[in-house]
Image (cartoon, coloured by chain):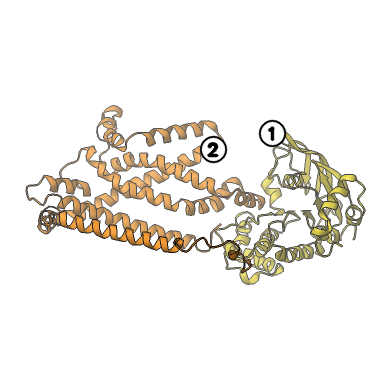
Amino acid sequence: MSVPASAPAARPVQGRARMSPRRRARISRGIQYALLVVALLALALAMDWDRIGENIFNVDAAKALLPKLPGAFLNTITYTLSAFAVGLSLGTVLALMRLSSVAPYRWIATAYIEFFRGIPALLVVFSFGYAVPIALGVRIDSLTLKVALALGMVAAAYIAETIRAGIQAVPPGQVEAARSLGMSHGRTLVTVVIPQAFRIVLPPMTNEIVLLTKDTSLVFALGLMSTQLDLTRVGRDALNSASGGGLTGLFVVGLCYLAITIPLGLFARWLERRTGKGARS
Amino acid sequence: MTATAEGTNAGGATAPVVEMVGLRKSFGDREVLKGIDLTVTPGEVVCIIGPSGSGKSTLLRCVNQLEEATGGTVTVLGTEITDPDVDIDAVRQRVGMVFQQFNLFTHQTVLENCTVAQRKVLRRSKAEAEEVAMRNLAHVGLADRAPAHPSHLSGGQQQRVAIARALSMDPQLMLFDEPTSALDPELVGDVLSVMRALAERGMTMLVVTHEMAFAREVADRVVFMDDGQIVEQGAPAQVIGAPQHERTQAFLERVLDPTHQHPGTA
């Protein structure tokens, strides 16, 4: 595209006093940086650093928590993974039901999704803790199983919608190509649609796991014994303990959650890069 | 132009490959095919031309039932596919199709694109499937791109891979749905020469195209469609060179207008 060199000159320059857009942008950036520095300085001066050190970054209080952390950390991960396993399997089934050509399957799946998406997860956890054993006469002894079912059933509603959207985002031409080669409907789904939907679904699915990791803090609603610890419980106990430290316990536990969720995000990004290598549509 | 090339197809040399009788297709209230009768014999290359919206692509897609006919019958390779109980997958295995938008599987390499159906549908071994795929990739001049992903190929290369993928199933009929319409002009030639070579090897081909030069040189028969009907058909020299119908003349005038003339059509 070759623009004649004389083209810009066609419009006369309107006075010198007017700033060029580039210069204006530079000044605007300078002002923004200055504001930031002022705000940070004000914050630093206004803070009571001794108090913060005592109540949030209290090393002694943090050390006191240390023995409890590995177990709680592991429990949180176990709850997350088992709930995700339930959510993913149930979610996949629900997604396929929503795409079914049999109308009642679609209705059931839609009703399920609307119901569990619309109620607080805490209600479901409460139900599994207290109501289900009494109302249905089913006793679930394993705490992990209870968590997995309660949170998994809620997660399934979200995961189903994610998977359905992923499947529908696969271009119809891909399906036509597969069918024209003689692949059956099911074979096409397994060989072409699901592998491509997986790539599409990866980023939102990472979100689901991160949300699920945080939702495991709701296990307290199942009625726990004092030996059953997850990260949030450790933080709460620290808050109530007499050993002081104020917010330190919650802060440390918060860091532990980040130690799970941030690597998860990095892993997903790596997986995305790997599966998406040269395979953009 | 030979009337019928010496078909390499085994058996039933005289039985038609495609036979449409009174084929109708509607989308809702809109009837896009209004009673089509068309027969394709073994080894024949039939080009379908006509204005957009005339039903050409729909007609082609009725041959492997990507669109289901709403009336009439379609018989492909001796199987009446308009019979509701037909095993359409068995017919599709023997009918290759090439799409305007290539539709290569984006999550697979070029080689995988050409082997996946051979392995999953024809149950060929990996070694055999790869041998067949490499032979067909060599035919289209892309054997060296076997490990590449489709997104790293030009449109013309992708379309040639799509042809190799279809050929790897050893089809007895090839359907081409505007195979060069999505390509940059300088890439059209490669795809057309692959198709020409295929025609010379005796493949039965049904081609929807806007490439008049190709239709004129390669087709045994040209079918002009307008408004869901076959208006005129016959040898290319006749239909393109000396069209009888007013609608054919009007269409060709627009397509062959000197300001849009394709080199070689003169």
In the picture of the structure, the residue carrying the numbered disc 2 is A100
**Can you give x and y, in whole percent of width and height, for residue B252 in the image?**
85, 52
Residue A230 at least partly seen: no
What residue do we see at 69% from left, 66% from top?
B136
Which kind of residue does numbered mark 2 sit on? Ser
Badge 2: residue crowd in 10 Å (few <14, some 14–19, many ≥20): some
Q: Foreground: A38 or A76?
A: A38
Image quadrant where one finds the C terminus of chain A: bottom right
What residue do we see at 86% from left, 48% from top?
B250
Which kind of residue does numbered mark 1 sit on? Gly
**Can you give x and y, in whole percent of width and height, for residue B187 in the image?**
70, 65
**Can you give x and y, in whole percent of width and height, for residue A152 in the image?**
35, 42
What colour do you see for chain A? orange
Q: Secondary structure at mark 2?
A: loop
In the picture of the structure, the residue carrying the numbered disc 1 is B28
Q: Secondary structure at mark 1?
A: loop
What residue do we see at 52% from left, 53% from top?
A196
